[in-house]
Amino acid sequence: MLRTWQDECITTALRKYQCDLTNFLAMATPGAGKTYMAAHLAKRLFELGKIDLVLCFTPSVTVTNSFQETLEFVTNKSMAGQLGSAGQVFTYHHLSFISTSFWEIFNNHRVFVIFDEIHHCSGQDIALANMWGEAILRHIRSRASYTLALSGTPWRSDKLPIALAQYSGNPSELQCDYIYPLSRAIADGVCRTPKVVAIDNDHIGYTQSGGEITSYKSIRDLLCHTEINYSDLLHNAPIVTFIIQQSINRLNGIRQHNPRAAGLIVASSVDHAYWLQDILAIQLNEPAIIVSYEEPESQRIIENFEEGDAKWIIAIGMVSEGTNIPRLQVCCYLSRVKTELYFRQVLGRIVRTRKESYPFAYLYVLAEETLLGYANRIGKDLPSDLAIVEMQQMDTASVIENHSQDNSEEESNASPNKGDISLGVIQDINVDGTSLVDESAPEAAMIGKGISLSGQFSEELILLQHAFNEAC
């Protein structure tokens, strides 16, 4: 049975398609059920005799598998891309390998194309688009019978325009055809109410090179007045142990209501993940599963975790977007990535509800200024300064340089098995082309970097009443 918002969105899309407008952009908060809605829209188009085939593009292999299963279940048609199939699901990364002859499919068939998390694809002009955006503009935009672009976070950290999106005004502001915000999803019981908990300490000692110790009253104070950076704190054992312990306490309390509730720890790197696993196992007596982009069986690990009742999973870039593990209800954010896009994607992993008796989700973060800013903006599902893009003219040399950098970034993050596109490593590439995983800094150099703690830890529950008065 469709949720109210899904039925509304499908009706709105069909109405637009009937007016010979072929592109539709839907923004729905992470965890709302965009995949199921898209599958039912495809089903309706098949039933109405409007399409022959479906193509779908997603940001990762994990999401690709899930999307294919949902499309096949809802439409009762094969999406395996074989003879007799009604379509196929690809990763965006696959766009680099599709032959030119493949696109002749649009010459002989009416094709519905779905773009999941379209913000990964930038560009409204071929010359200024990234690799995936260029392929969409060149081969799909004017040839598909209908397109559906989906996103839970429809903006880019680099403020470039999203492929197929419409902008208007000065400055250019994103125009969505349908919006389903987090506040409404909570009121509808579709998503859990998120609670962001910021961890701080009121007496942090910092030993300078000459041996002098200076005390700081907060993490913000420390970061503003010393050479210590946010990444250093993620490798400080006392700080990390405390934030994980608080997360464990919270999860144990939730499991009294929801026995299979689970926790996610978002790590900064593979080495960092194993260090965190040791802290959990040795100091806190909590076993944890690790899933990373280096693990060829990552999809199986995630599926086994969702089907089982293990309490903790530590992820490096693998559970940030589109991954469906509804039993996740607590998250410990220990990633070096500090973009609002990534922050919201991680939050989306724990708000997906199962109609359980305890309808809250907790995100634990360090009280770092940027992250606190994001937490206080959660009430705005489409931040105005991020939904606005800067339409810039670039000279030819800059375009060539930026495009080649995009290509080199993707090659450097690609699977060790050249040509094997099944690992989904694009999950670890930010939408602006940069890597989400920074392996450049030696782990040992960042541990114990002159930081000592002698004060009291504190928790601040970030108040989100301005967004969730009705839900709370």
Image: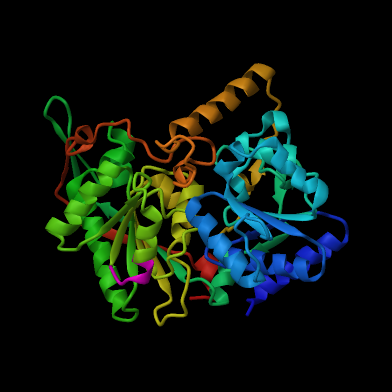
Q: Residue farthest to the front?
A: 83
Q: Residue farthest to the right?
A: 19
Q: Residue at x 74, y 44 (%)?
A: 140
Could you say which is closer to the camera, residue 248 or residue 375? 248
For the magenta stretch, what is the residue range?
A: 305-310
Compared to 154, does 447 lie above or below? Answer: above
Q: Residue at x 29, y 46 (%)?
A: 219
Q: Position of residue 381 (x, y in %)?
A: 58, 58
For residue 363, what is the image quadrant?
bottom left
Q: Position of residue 372 (x, y in %)?
A: 42, 51
Q: Residue at x 30, y 76 (%)?
A: 255
The stretch drawn in magenta includes residue 106? no
Question: Going by the image, does 187 lie left or right of 464?
Answer: right
Question: Going by the image, does 159 lie left or right of 393?
Answer: left
Q: Work out whether residue 155 can be spotted.
A: no
Q: Work out whether residue 39 can be spotted.
A: yes
Q: Position of residue 292 (x, y in %)?
A: 35, 48
Q: Position of residue 265 (x, y in %)?
A: 32, 56
